[in-house]
Image (tube, rainbow, N blue to C red):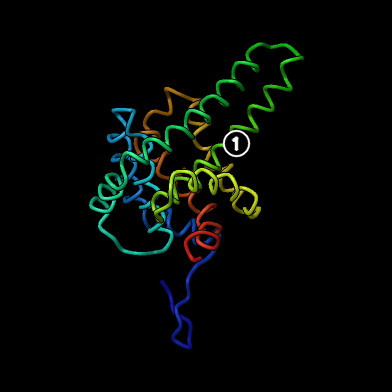
Amino acid sequence: MGYQQDGSENRKKGLPLLFHVMISRLLSLIALNVMYVVCCIPLVTIPSASVAMMKCVGLMLAEEDFPLFSVFFAALKSEFLKTLAVGWLMLLLLFGALFGALFYWSADAQITLIPAVFCAILAVLLFSAYNNLLYMLANVRLPFGALIKNAFLLLFARSLRGVAASSGALLILTACAWWFPRSIPILLLIAFSVSALVACFGVRDVIETYIIKR
C-alpha cells in the first residue's frame, strides 16, 4: 500500500483494488477456496461456509492482514443455525429459478423462450440478493426478517458497478458449470473464492453505506 507525498494513505479503489487483491492475495484465495470446498462437502453447511468466505474476501478488499484459518472458522460457527435457515431459504429460491430457466430452455419451443428468460433474470436477481445476505451475515447482526428484507431492498440501491460485479461473479460459476467436469481443477482451486471476491466487491459499498454505518 502506497502513501502520498503529504503522508496520507493512498488506498486503491475500484477495479485497481480488485485486481490488486486478486494478484497479491492469490495464495490466500487458493487456500480459502480449498477450505470452502471441504466445508461444503456435507452440503447442508453451504450457507455457513459461504458466509465465512464472504467475511474473508471482505477483509481482503479492505486490505487488512488477518489469520485466514481462524477468521474463516470463527465466521463459519457464528450464528450457525440462523445462517443455515436464512441461507437455505435464499438458495432454494435461487435453485428454483435456475431449474426453471433450464427446464424452459430445454423444451426447445418458441413459446417457452419468454418464461426461460424470465427465470434467468430472476436467478440473477436472487443471486445478487444472496450476495447481499451473505455480506450482512458476515458483518452485522440483524433479525431474520430484516436480513431477508434488506437483501432484496438493497438491490435497488446498487450502483452500475455493483450490478456488473454480481453478474461477473455469477458468470464465473456459470462458465465452470458449463464446462464441467473439465472445470473441476478450477472449481477446487480458485473459482469459488474469486467469484466471492468479485461479488463482495459489488455489494460491500452499498451495505456499508445503508446498513453497517447507520
Q: Is residue 190 left or right of residue 38?
A: right
Where is residue 72 shown, x and y percent of the image? 29, 49
Residue 147 vertical position relative to residue 122 in the rendered view, above or below:
below
| Amino acid, disc 1 | Val
* Pick the front one: 37 or 98: 98
Specify whether 134 is left or right of 150: left
Vertical position of residue 1 compared to residue 164: above or below: below
In the picture, the quarter occupied by the N terminus is bottom left
Secondary structure category for the residue under label 1:
helix
Q: Residue at x 34, y 41 (%)?
A: 33
Instruction: Place residue 66 in its image quadrant.
Output: bottom left
Question: Foreground residue, 13 or 81?
Answer: 81
Residue 22 is situated, as x and y percent measured from the top left of the image, at 43, 53
Residue at screen point 48% across, 88% down: 6
Badge 1, how many Cα within 10 Å: few under 14, some, many 20+?
some
Q: Nearer the viewer, residue 10 or 129?
A: 129
What's the residue at 65%, 17% (across, down)? 105
The residue at the far bottom in this view is 6
Q: Is residue 112 above or below residue 192?
A: above
Q: Residue at x 48, y 44 (%)?
A: 145
Residue bearing mark 1: 124
Residue 26: image location, x then y, percent: 36, 51
Q: Position of residue 109 (x, y in %)?
A: 73, 11
